[in-house]
């Protein structure tokens, strides 16, 4: 099924109208990233070609060793321990 409009915004509206709710959520997430200046700056940042220092190598090795005998802590658990929710973070980011 082709989109009749030649106006890009109108085409976007028509395509979004045809999407399932989960697809709309994914597209909204992408649109937020595209419109967020920090995310855009990170996406366009040059590749970090600085060599890894000995201290960083040691920290990475320690972290990887720790993960061998432990389970990573889920993001939600960290937030709960800090007494905040993902919704609060999202609302804060929306005000920026």
Image: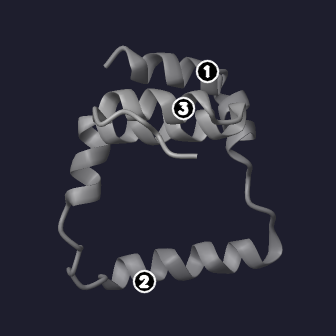
Q: Nearer the viewer, residue 83 or 90?
A: 90
Camera-nearest label, 3 or 2? 3
Q: Position of residue 73 (x, y in %)?
A: 73, 52
Who comes first in sequence, dot 1 or dot 3? 3
Element marked by disc 2: helix
Who comes first in sequence, dot 3 or dot 2? 3
* Residue at 62% in and 33% down: 18
Query: Residue 16, labelled with which disc?
Result: 3
Q: Quadrant of residue 79?
A: top right
Element marked by disc 1: helix
* Mark 1 crowdedness (10 Å alpha carbons): few <14, some 14-19, many ≥20: few
Disc 3 + disc 2, Cβ < 8 Å:
no
Quadrant for the C terminus in the image:
top left
Q: Position of residue 32 (x, y in %)?
A: 40, 33
Residue 29 as seen in the image, left or right of residue 77: left
* Residue at 23% in and 73% down: 47
Who comes first in sequence, dot 2 or dot 1? 2
Query: Residue 57, labelled with which disc?
Result: 2
Q: Nearer the viewer, residue 60 or 9?
A: 9
As drawn, 84 above or below 55: above
Q: Position of residue 81 (x, y in %)?
A: 71, 31
Element marked by disc 3: helix
The residue pinned by badge 1 equals 87
As drawn, 26 above or below 16: below
Question: How far apart, in angstroms, are the residues tagged by discs 3 and 2?
Answer: 46 Å
Question: How far apart, in angstroms, are the residues tagged by discs 2 and 1?
Answer: 35 Å
* Mark 3 crowdedness (10 Å alpha carbons): few <14, some 14-19, many ≥20: some
* Mark 2 crowdedness (10 Å alpha carbons): few <14, some 14-19, many ≥20: few
* Residue at 20% in and 61% down: 45
């Amino acid at each position: 099924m082709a989109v009749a409009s030649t106006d890009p915004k109108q085409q976007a509206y028509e395509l979004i109208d045809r999407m399932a709710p989960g697809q709309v959520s994914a597209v909204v997430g992408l649109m937020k990233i595209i419109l967020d200046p920090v995310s855009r700056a990170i996406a366009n940042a040059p590749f970090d070609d600085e060599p890894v220092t000995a201290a960083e190598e040691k920290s990475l090795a320690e972290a990887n060793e720790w993960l061998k005998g432990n389970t990573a802590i889920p993001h939600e658990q960290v937030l709960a321990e800090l007494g905040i929710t993902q919704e609060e973070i999202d609302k804060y980011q929306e005000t920026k």
